[in-house]
Image (cartoon, helix red, strand yellow):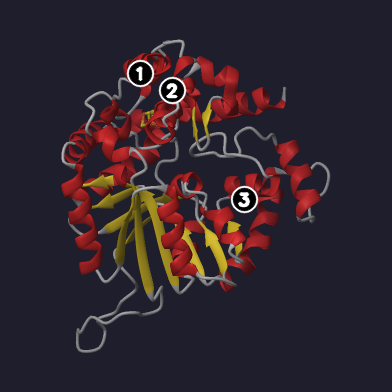
Amino acid sequence: MSWEIAVERAINNNVPRVYKILKEHPYILDLAKELREAKLKVLENLDYYVDKTLDSVKRAGGHGYLASTPEEAREIVGKIVGKGKTVVMGKSMVAYEAGIREFLIRQGNEVWETDLGEFLIQLANQPPSHIIAPAIHLTKEEVEKLLKEKIGGVHEGSTHEELVARVRQFLREKFVNADVGITGANAVASDTGTIALIENEGNIRFSSISPAMHIAITGVDKIVPTLADATKEVLVQSAFAGLYPPTYVNFTSGPSSTADIEMKRVSPAHGPKEFHLILLDNGRIKASKDPVLREALLCIRCGRCHLHCPVYRALGVKWGDPPFTGPMGAMWSYVVYNDPKPAMYCAHSGNCKEVCPMKINIPKVLEYIKWKGNKQKA
Ligand code: SF4
């Protein structure tokens, strides 16, 4: 089965690399402990931190919004973007959760995913199968066939490098002509209103700098107390994702600005004229008030639990409600979609808990969701 081959290759490429990174940079484990404490502090008082973050975004010259539901998030994005625009999107699970791409296309915009994996599943019209590698289920041979059919310019037996080069060539013109860039955020610093984004491709930097407008959409669970904590999050996430050091770390605090004339800070400069941050609740604030479910909100989306889980290896993309797959997805399908079914498949191997940088007791959370699900049925 091609799915199993693709995941086996990904596991062989990724798992030894993470162990090597952690051995070479042992300070990451200390940062992970500190990050867990910082995130817990926010989750124990989330309403306060949401308000504080929105104030900070405003102080930095941006616009901040809290969207209670995906519908509200779409309405906010729809008003900001309007119609007839070219939109480039960096990878955002929350944008997927809120159905932003399809909504903007329906509203009459040209919209392109620019993360390579997201671009592939946009072309294939498929859901993402892993939180950091959304096209993990496609083999190289399938990617070649897909590109050949949809955009051309590849030949039989193309190398990995040739496939990536073809997508680079196709998307370059979209970046240059885009009116709006939409990204997610790996962390949001409450004290400064800064969003932190990690990437390797360069697509997020393009999407957040080249267009005149940058919209970031993320969950309220991404808030951390300070910019120093946001820095810890990008280091810990990238290490546990096996991509350390990350090629790019982007910090964005409001629209572009300069103080080069008489040291007076004015905006915009060369980058975006407008910066908007949309924080999505969609069940997260309720979950933060439940001492067991709160643990799920500590997830930093490194994707490590997937690759150590026997159930994910067996079920793959079919396990969870997209974009939430794997062990973290079984927790998040309940938090966001109130769906306890993915939790029911957990076989409690416990590997996920062992490898999680946030030390989330995933089996315990899933046991609790199973109990809640059974109570709903009774
Ligand atoms: S649950 Fe833990 S291991 Fe899994 S994606 Fe989240 S932080 Fe990573």
The residue carrying mark 3 has its beta carbon less than 8 Å from ligand 1 = no
Percent position (x, y) of residue 183?
Answer: 45, 56
Percent position (x, y) of residue 201?
Answer: 52, 53
Side of 260 where 305 appears, left or right: right
Q: Residue furthest bottom?
A: 262
Secondary structure category for the residue under label 1: helix
Q: Is residue 314 above or below residue 77?
A: above
Q: Which mark is residue 372?
A: 1
Q: CA distance from mark 2 to mark 1?
A: 8 Å
Q: CA distance from mark 1 to mark 3?
A: 37 Å
Secondary structure category for the residue under label 2: loop
Residue shown at 54% from the left, 26% from the top: 11
Tell me the kind of residue under disc 1.
Lys
Q: Which mark is residue 340?
A: 2
Q: CA distance from mark 3 to mark 2?
A: 30 Å
Side of 69 where 298 appears, left or right: left
Residues marked 2 and 1 touching at CB (< 8 Å): yes
Q: Is residue 183 above or below residue 361?
A: below
Of badges 3 and 2, the one in the foreground is 2
Q: Is residue 328 above or below residue 196?
A: above
Quarter containing the N terminus? top right
The disc, 2 or 1, on the residue closer to the chain's N-terminal end is: 2
Disc tally is: 3
Secondary structure category for the residue under label 3: helix
Q: Which mark is residue 336?
A: none
Tell me the kind of residue under disc 2.
Pro
The local crowd at label 2, few if under 14, some if 14 to 19, many if 20 or more residues have their Cα within 10 Å, is many
Look at mark 3 in the image and give the residue it sits on: 119
Quarter containing the C terminus? top left
Picture quadrant where residue 253 is located: bottom left
Q: Residue furthest right?
A: 156
